[in-house]
Structure formats: C-alpha cells, structure tokens
Image: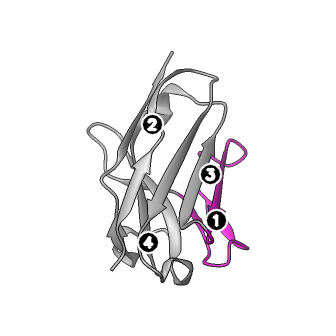
C-alpha cells in the first residue's frame, strides 16, 4: 500500500516557476515508477511526466519538454516536478501516481489527491 500526498501548487504568472512535491508512504517506494498527470477544467486527465524506480529513465509529454523536470529521491520517498516557463495552458489539477509506468492512467495503482496549479496571463 502506498499513500501519496502532493504539495506546492498555487497561483503564478505566465513565465514563472513552481515546484510540486509528492510525498509517499511505504517501504516499497523505489519499486514503483512514478508519474505526474494533470487535469484541466473540462478536459480529461493527461500524462505529464514519469520517472523510473531508479531515477535513471524519464519520459515527458511533448507539451512540457524543456520546461518541466521530474525527479525523485528514494531515500526520502519523494518525487518532484520542477515547472519553469509556465503557460496559462498549464493550469490544471496535478496528480502524482505510482505504478507500473507508461503514459496510461490505468497503469498506475496509487494516486494522490491532487494540487491546483493556476497560471495567469
């Protein structure tokens, strides 16, 4: 069983930065691939970025490549998403997830409650 809690969301102007964090419980954190998804109002939840259990491999959606960086610290059971050059279209509720990996929601067994990110123009 893994419990995930996101933090770090907020309101920022376009071009600004935010750092999201995800704290995980449980002793098997390093065995899970971790990911960030987001859901904008009126839209389906979409994949943002993922990181392998050993933090060596990452994957990101084209829409955030070069702007967002995913990382994890297995010693602290945490994952982060550094978001730079934010755009209004990045406005969404951001969720962290733990599971088998990939870009599909159904590959992730555990989810956090989400944290709101709002980017003003």
The answer to whether 113 is drawn above or below residue 76 in the figure is: above
Q: Earlier in the sequence, mark 4 or mark 1?
A: 1
* Helix, strand or loop status at disc 1: strand
Which residue in the rendered view is the most extreme toward the left?
42
Using the rendered view, name the quadrant where residue 106 is placed.
Answer: bottom left
Task: Relative to 83, say whether 81 is above or below.
Answer: below
Question: In the image, is 70 to the left or to the right of 46?
Answer: right
Which span of residues is magenta-colored? 49-75
**Label 2: element kind:** loop
Q: Which percent across, then down, holds residue 109?
A: 34, 76
Q: Dot 3, crowdedness within 10 Å: few (<14), some or many (≥20)?
A: few
Q: Judging from the image, what secondary structure is the residue with disc 4 in?
A: strand
Q: Earlier in the sequence, mark 2 or mark 4?
A: 2
Q: CA distance from mark 2 to mark 4?
A: 19 Å
- Provide residue 102's location: percent of width, then percent of height: 51, 74
Quadrant assignment for the N terminus = bottom left
Q: Label 3, label 1: how many angstroms apart (C-alpha)?
A: 24 Å
Q: Residue at x 52, y 50 (%)?
A: 21
Q: Nearer the viewer, mark 3 or mark 2?
A: 2
Q: Are marks 2 and 1 in contact (CB under 8 Å)?
A: no
Disc assigned to residue 9: 2
* Residue 49, numbered circle: none
Circle 4 residue: 98
The residue that disc 1 covers is: 73
- The residues bearing labels 2 and 1 have C-alpha atoms spaced at a distance of 19 Å
Secondary structure of residue under mark 3: loop
Which label lies toward us, 3 or 4? 4
Residue for badge 3: 62
Magenta highlight on residue 73: yes
């Amino acid at each position: 069983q893994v419990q995930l809690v996101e933090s770090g969301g907020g309101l920022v102007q376009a071009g600004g930065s935010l750092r999201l964090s995800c704290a995980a419980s449980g002793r098997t954190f390093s065995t899970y691939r971790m990911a960030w998804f987001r859901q904008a109002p009126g839209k389906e939840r979409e994949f943002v970025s993922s990181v392998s259990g050993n933090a060596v491999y990452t994957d990101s959606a084209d829409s955030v490549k070069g702007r967002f960086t995913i990382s994890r610290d297995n010693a602290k059971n945490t994952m982060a998403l550094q978001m730079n050059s934010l755009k209004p279209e990045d406005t969404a509720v951001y969720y962290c997830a733990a599971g088998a990996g990939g870009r599909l929601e159904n590959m992730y067994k555990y989810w956090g409650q989400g944290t709101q990110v709002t980017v003003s123009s």
